[in-house]
Amino acid sequence: QQAESAGGGGSSSSSSSGSSTKLAVSLAKALEVGEKRCRAVPGVLLDAAAGSVWDAGDLVRRSVSSGGGYADGVVGLGLEGLPASLEALAPQEAVLGRLFVTLDWLGVTQLGGGAFEVLVHAAGACNRHPSPVFYVATSEDDTFVVIIPWVGAEVPAEEALFAACTEVLRTTQPMTKPPYQALRFDAPFDVRYAARTFEIPDSATQLELPAAPLPGDTNTGTVHLAEFSSLVVGPGRATPGRLGGNGVATTAAFAVQRPFAVCLFHTDIDDLNAPLSATLVS
């Protein structure tokens, strides 16, 4: 079973962040134009605030107390201090984006010692990446987990991971006959990235904001991002009796070793060939 929650997103001031920001802008434009224009990003909830009634801090406080498992997903991410740090910025406007999903593997075998295997739905090869790219089906027909091993390749920085995974997906060609039937994980894993806030350098240019504010507008065009995420992955609850399988490892299984990326892929935005999210497990 996999559960993932995320709030905010963006890039830092490293040299790789420029390409990440440009990618975000291009994806936003692609969602607004074309045959499938004015689309929403699947699974993402948006809340906005402006003025003194519902400020940025209130957005975070309300989201954490929204229930439905989200509060459990953000434990240990340092959100208790995030409202105060956001309010100190005195933003004129704020937007909070949340992605929270819980999925079951579509085909999982529990092995001894906490290890487990999941069936490979499809696999591909990328001429810029040394390892195969694996798609794993979930309980939702339109949502897949993509596993990108990074062993033997230069691991991208945290702020560049989404762009790096997108590049791999866009340059991957499907394998007619995947060499592996399953992926083997040696144990469940839990990855959490605590909340951090930073300014996008040269916000107006990178985000293509208006060159000058409207008359009477005190907005400087500076954009800050706060982001946090958690990812919990395991085999799920054991199926009792004969339905639970024999727990025998698959002969043709790819042993997933750290570091690797776990991405969510949704068919509603398959034309973008970009993941909904990307998390590095190191």
Image (cartoon, rainbow, N blue to C red):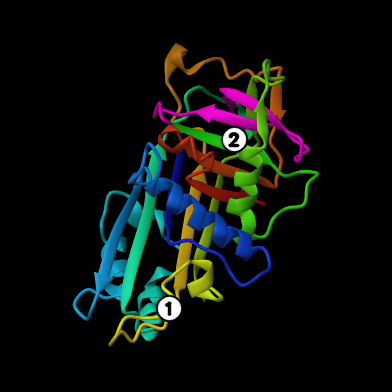
Relative vertical location of residue 12 with respect to residue 97 in this rendering, above or below: below
Residue at image coords 34%, 57%: 71
Left or right of residue 70: residue 267? right
Indicate the position of residue 248 as horizontal and vertical percent values: 63, 17
Q: Amino acid at mark 1?
A: Gly
| Magenta segment boundaries in residue numbering | 114-142
Which mark is on residue 114? 2
Instruction: Label 2, secondary structure: give it.
Output: helix
Q: Nearer the viewer, mark 2 or mark 1?
A: 1
Residue at image coords 48%, 35%: 270
Which mark is on residue 161? none
Q: Earlier in the sequence, mark 2 or mark 1?
A: 2
Hey, which residue is sitting farthest left in the picture? 53
Left or right of residue 217: residue 148? right
Q: Is residue 77 visible?
A: no
| Within-10-Å neighbours for mark 2: few <14, some 14–19, many 20+ | few
Left or right of residue 9: residue 186? right
The Cα–Cα distance between marks 2 and 1, rounded to whole angstroms, is 50 Å
Instruction: Label 1, secondary structure: give it.
Output: loop
Relative vertical location of residue 173 with respect to residue 219 in this rendering, above or below: above
Left or right of residue 58: residue 219? right
Q: Amino acid at mark 2?
A: Gly
The quadrant holding residue 189 is top right
Magenta stretch: residue 263 in it? Answer: no
Mark 2–mark 1 contact, CB under 8 Å?
no
Indicate the position of residue 117 as horizontal and vertical percent values: 60, 27
Which mark is on residue 221? 1
Q: Is residue 211 visible?
A: yes
Residue at image coords 58%, 52%: 162
Residue at image coords 43%, 78%: 221
